[in-house]
Structures are given as structure tokens and as C-alpha cells.
Image (spheres, rainbow, N blue to C red):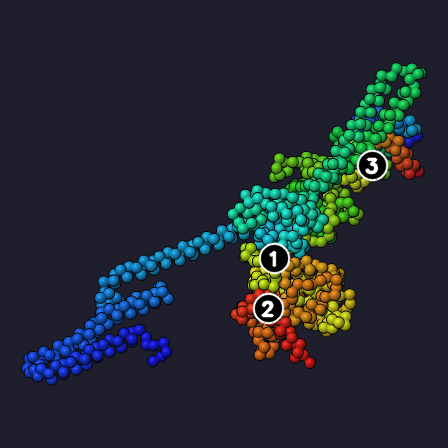
Amino acid sequence: MTRQGLPKRQRLVGVWLLLSGVSLVGGALFAAWLDSQLALSGVARAALWLGSFSGGITLFLMGLLLERMLFTPLRHLQAQLARWVANPDAPDEHTVEGWLKGLGPDLRRVSHSWRADRSRLATAHAEGARSASRIRQELETLLQVLETPLLLCDRHRRVMLFNQAAENFFAGNTGLGLGKRLDALLPTATLANAMAQLPDDGSPREMLAPSDQRWLKVVIRRVPGSERETLVTCSDATTTWNNEMGVRAELNHLLPPLRQHSASLSSAADALRQIPPSETSLELRARLEQVVHDESQALNKHVAEIGSLLDDLQYHGERLRPIWSNDFWQSLDERLDPAHRLITPIGVPAWFKGDAPALIELFDSLVDHLRCHLPSSGFEGEITLNPKRAYVDLIWQGSPVPEGELTIWREHPLTTLPLSPSVADILRQHATDIWSVADADKRHARLRLPLPTIAQAQAPRELAPPRPEFHDFGIAQLPAPDEALASRALRCLDIVAFDTETTGLELRRGDTVISLGACRIVNGRLLANDAFDHFVDPKRAIPAASTVIHGITDADVAGAAPLETVLGLFRDYIGEAVLLAHNAAFDMLAISNRGVDFTMPVLDTLLISKALDEALDGHDLDTLAKRYDLHFPPGTRHTALGDARVTAELWLALLPRLEARGIDTLEELLVLQANAFDKEDASAP
Amino acid sequence: MANVLVVDDEPNILLSLEYLMSHAGLTVTTAPDGETALQRIADSSPDLLLLDISLPGISGFEVLEQLRRSESERHLPVIMLTAHGREVEREKGFALGADDYVTKPFSTQQLVEKVKALLAERAP
């Protein structure tokens, strides 16, 4: 017997047997007493004994009957119901029996209907999930091909979504990232105020915001029906604004003096015509002639100013966009003959400004024209820069195209462009002309098209592959950023995991950082495409012994920014996140005292691991990576970014173990970490 | 006395330039278009050419190009005149072999000075 008592069935059987036994014994005693009192014999005596036992026997038989016809079928039914609950598709092993037999058909119908309903629900669920996934995929594709930079922010102005166009638009700006505040990207008080006061009906509000060297037109609107989420779209308004406030304003200023001089000139000319040719009018005539001379000089000067302003206007025209020469030659080549390469780009590639589709059409028509005269040897494309212009040169072996032929070609309509403009129209649009001259070697000739250049030297960034994480709507569920960090749940922390590579381990004796890499964890996910990866100029030679470890040579860091600059960028990258490193004491020492404050809490996977598994040996990154089955691409260990990523993965592996120990908030973790640090400190020799 | 050929299709400016150049001691002939200009050059071998770019028929650039290709006139000093005044056109003029370039409107005084300077430079 256990303390919990007999199981129910056993108790029932016990009570039944006890009652039957008591009845039988009681009946036997009663029958023996009556028998001795009445001294019956024969049938009367038999009837007395039988009557006395009848109660017990009836009780015993009733029990047997109930057990067989009711309790056993009920127990079987209970087992079957439990089996169905655990596994709805379990077979019907027990048929309904005894007095419950009548329930059989109903029960079967109920179970079949239930299974059919479940199956229908499962199908509908799967169908719904497929449909939702398809819609999501379509929306993602749509967002990513949309040319308008777009961001979606939660009510705390944290970015929950951004598209490829936004990533390209803000290329190089460390303020853009999932979970980061919009204020880091567009630090304008007016934007924050406007977002706070947006109407809920989705009507847009526009404003101009400065960003780097640009003026951005920012359009914000509340997403109707959302939890005060805001959709932000941006466009570069610098050109429009400069034209509006610059060239056009100057043209407007020039008009009144032009009218003035023109009026003076025509009045003086009229007066001169009307003066009678007499001696007395000689002086007046001389004065009027001086007026005509002065006014025409003034007009000349203003007309020259207008000419240069109009040139400016066309050079800064909105349709003229930056073009990278290699991209231009490649697009032209694909257009001319998709199967063969006809144009070989030579020289140093450069940026210039132009209306790319119009220029492609223009060159396409030109090459068609040239190919009639030239052997099929192909062309070379070269960009020659002078301080004001980029010459886009098409070069071939042979003699230059006579100007007369170019004149005919200028009138050629480009029928694939809207309104079929002529070549001359496109040249006018670019405020330029075209000419052909022989090269100095006399063997080659070139066709030269001057175009505006732009002050940019670097090649365009390679287009990042579509990022797997460009949205995370879970960000909206994160606590408000101004809420005390200490009580923040670990899983909700914004974390930047980082690592440094150094010239050596003696940081206090002059060793310093040569590479700084970091990655970001938002909402418990490591963002694959959000990375900080910079070489640092250590201003000293990298010892060969340390190059053996990280593979970084003096050549790698030549021309890199100094540590102070990289730390400034790193501080911007961190935003409001918490720092994470493995053996953080070393990395924090490497980046401290360089003029940039890192006052945010710092987590250390080394200390956390020691706190969790005091008894285990081996808490270095490699051992822990093995212990938690973390994999990383070959060659990425011992690079700053590679190790930062392993540290981030390690954190995500430690997180459930911390939660299982009831360590849920940053405050609790910092206490645990501090204790581990104290123990380590105490055990240190 | 140096002989200057002025080529322009605008009669008003031809009238003034002809007078001003003569006044400055130069012999002036005029031509209203590119074809006539080439003919005059062949006939009278001028010492300098004032050449407008926008001409009926063959353009000033074409005239310049033909001169620079011909054996006899490839060194004839040429000052281009234009009403467009774009810097690109200026560069094109120099690329095709012009010696100087003047944008309309211009100061006649300065033009005459340029002509004289160029003539002096090329004087044997």
C-alpha cells in the first residue's frame, strides 16, 4: 500500500468483496442463531440458510455483473479516449462492449468526424501558411526591387525593415541597421517631432533632412491600423534644391539688370537716330555713343554670365546621374552584340555624369554608323579626365570620322527613345558636343564625347546579395529603448559582438589593434549581413609571429584609417547595443583610452561559460565552439569578424542555459559574470 | 598689309567687322558661308581667318577640318567665332586645330587685338 492509497478500481473491488464477505458471514451467523433457536428441519431449515445467504450472494453477483457489463467497458472507453487525446490518429483498438454497446455507433461517428475536422483544419492551416509564405515572398521581392529607399520603423523609431534601395542609398552610413533608431541615420530633431505628431490616417508629411553632404527629401506616414509604425521614404533632393536655390535664383537676379541695360541701349539708339546732324548736337551725340558703348559692354557681360549659368544648369541636370565607366562600356557592349565583346575598356575607370539610357542609344547609333566604315576589329573605350570633364572616348584603328559625317549623324533620330530625339538633342541635353581626332600615334583615331565628371574615385560597391535579414517585425515587441537596460530580458538585448586582432599580446607595452570586426544580434538572431569589418593602421610594423596567427601583413593595413577614426565608426555602429566579446578584458583594453568612450555594459562569453560550468576545463573559443557544435567557414577563425561571429553564435548557444538557470535579465547576468570574474581574480596567482 | 577673311552668315556683324578691321589697318574680305570661304581661301590665300561655327551648308568646324587636312593651308591662323559659347565647343575648336576662340558677344577692341597678336606671332 502506498501513501496515496489504493487505485480506484482496487478500492472498489475491495469495498465490494468486503461488503459481500460481511453479508455472507453475517448471513451465516444469523442463520446459525435462528437454526439453534427454532430447531427447524428439512425444507424449512434449507430455506432458512438459503435466505440468510441471499443478501451476500446477491451483492457478490451484482458486483460481478456491474464489473463485466459497465466498469470494464467504461475503463476501456477511458483508455481509448486517452489514446485519442495523445494521438488522434491512433487505431480504435477496443470496441465498445457491455451495457455501453449502444454508444458504439455514436462514438465511432464522433471520432470519425473529429478526425475529418482535424484533417481539414491541418490542410487549411498548411494552405494558409503556403499562401502567407507566397505573399510574403512576393512582398519581399517587390520591396527589394523597389527603387525608392524605404524604411519601416516601430513606435520607438527603431528600424524594423528596409529595402535594398535604402541600403544602397545609405551605403557607408553605419546608422542603418535593423533595430537601430532612425535618429542614428537621420539625426534631425524635426523628423523625430514630426513622427511623434503624425496623423493616423496615413497622410504623408514631407521634410528636408541633411545627411552627409546631401539634402534628403524625407516622406513619412503612419501605417494605418498599426501600432504607431511609420513608413519612411527618402530621395536625394540636393540637385533640385541647388538648382532651385542656386542657378535659378541667380538667373532671376540677372533678369532685372538685363532689362535695365537693354532699355538704356534701345533708348540711346533711338535718340541717336533722331538727333539732327548739327554742330550743337555733337556733344550730345558723343555722350549717347558712349552710352551705347557702355550699355553694350554691360549686356555682353551679363549674357556671358547667363551662358555659364545655363551650362551649370545642364551640368547639374536631374537626369544626369553618376555612371561608372566600366558599367557603361559593359551595358553598351551588351546592347551592341550580346554574343560578342566588341568594346574593350582600357585606361583607369572613372565616374562621369550622364543620362545613361540616352547615352547608350547614342553610342549604339554611333557604333552602327562607324561599323559601316571600319574593319570588324572592335573598339576600345577609354575615359580621360581633366579637372572639369570626363572625356568618353571610343577608339579604333584607322582615321578619324570627318566632321561632315558627324554632322549628318547628329540629325539621326534615336527612335528607341521617347519622342525620338536626334543625336543633337541628346548632345544638347548633356550641354556637350562630339568630335573625332587622330591619336598621336597616327594609327588610331578616337571619337570624343566630353561629359561632366564627379568628385568620386572609388569603384561602385559590389551589389550585396539579397540580404536574408532586411526585416524583423519582432523588433516592435522589444521594450522601449529608454527602459532601464538592467531589467531588459537577455533575449531582447541588442548586442554587438566584436573582436580585435592586434600586433601582439602586450597591449600595455605598445601592441595595438590592426583589425576590428563586429556583428549584431537583434531579437536573439545574428544578422548575417550586418557587419563591421575594418583594418586599422597600427603605425608600426606587424611582427611576423603575429602575422602567422591572423595572416594580416603590413601590406593589408597600408592606407587603412588610424585606430581613433575606426573607433569613431565603431561607436556609431554600436548605437545603443550592449557589447559582447570573448575574453572581453583584452579587447576592451585594446580599444580603451583612444578618445572614444565605450560606456555600455560589456558581456564576456568566457566569464559566462566559466560561471555556468565551473567544473569543466577549457573555456577558450575553439573548445567552446566544439562543445556547442558551432561551425564556421574555413579561414574565418582568427579574423576579427570571423571570431566576432563565433562569439555571437556562442552567446546564442549559452542563452537557453542561462534562461534555464533563471538568469533572465541583463542585471542578473552582470551579477553572475561579476562573481565569475571575482572567482577568477581570487584564483589568479 | 595683312589680309583677313571674315566668314559669318550674319550681314550686320560682317558690316561692323569689315569696317573695324579696315580701320585697324587690315585688308578685309568676307564670305557668307563655308563653301564661299573655302573658295576665297583658295583664290586669295588670306593671312588669317575669322570663322563663325554656325554657317549654312558646311559648318565652321568642317571648314577648319578641311583646312587642317590640306597641305597648303594647314598652318593658316584661324580664330573661331561662336554664339553658343559652351566650353565644350571651345575645346572642340582647339581639338580640331583652331588657334583662338571668341564667344559672341565680344568686345570688338579685344577681337582686333587678338587678330593683330596672332598675325604678329605668325609673321615670318
What residue would you read off at disc 3?
B101
SS at mark 2 in the image = helix
On what subunit does the disc labeled 2 rest? A
**Depth order, front residue of A192/A141:** A192
Q: Position of residue A318 (x, y in %)?
A: 68, 41
**Which residue sits furthest front?**
A37
Q: Are marks 1 and 3 on the same chain?
A: no
Label 1, label 3: how far apart the Cα atoms are: 66 Å
Q: Residue at x 86, y 28 (%)?
A: A294
SS at mark 3 in the image = strand
Give, as a three-letter code, the residue at label 1. Answer: Pro
Label 2, label 1: how far apart the Cα atoms are: 19 Å
What residue would you read off at disc 2?
A669
Q: Residue at x 72, y 73 (%)?
A: A505
- Report if residue A143 is visible in the image: no
Label 3, label 2: how far apart the Cα atoms are: 78 Å
Q: Position of residue A242 (x, y in %)?
A: 72, 41
Q: Are marks 3 and 2 in contact (CB under 8 Å)?
A: no
A71 horizontally vs A50: left or right: right
SS at mark 1 in the image = loop
Image quadrant where one finds the N terminus of chain A: bottom left
Point out the tag, 2 or 1, that comes first from the N-terminus. 1
**Depth order, front residue of A432/A443:** A432
Q: Position of residue A265 (x, y in %)?
A: 82, 25
Q: Residue at x 26, y 71 (%)?
A: A72
**Depth order, front residue of A380/B84:** B84
Image quadrant where one finds the C terminus of chain A: bottom right
What residue would you read off at disc 1?
A481
Give, as a three-letter code, the residue at label 2. Answer: Leu
**Depth order, front residue of A677/B57:** A677
Which mark lies nearer to you, 3 or 2? 2
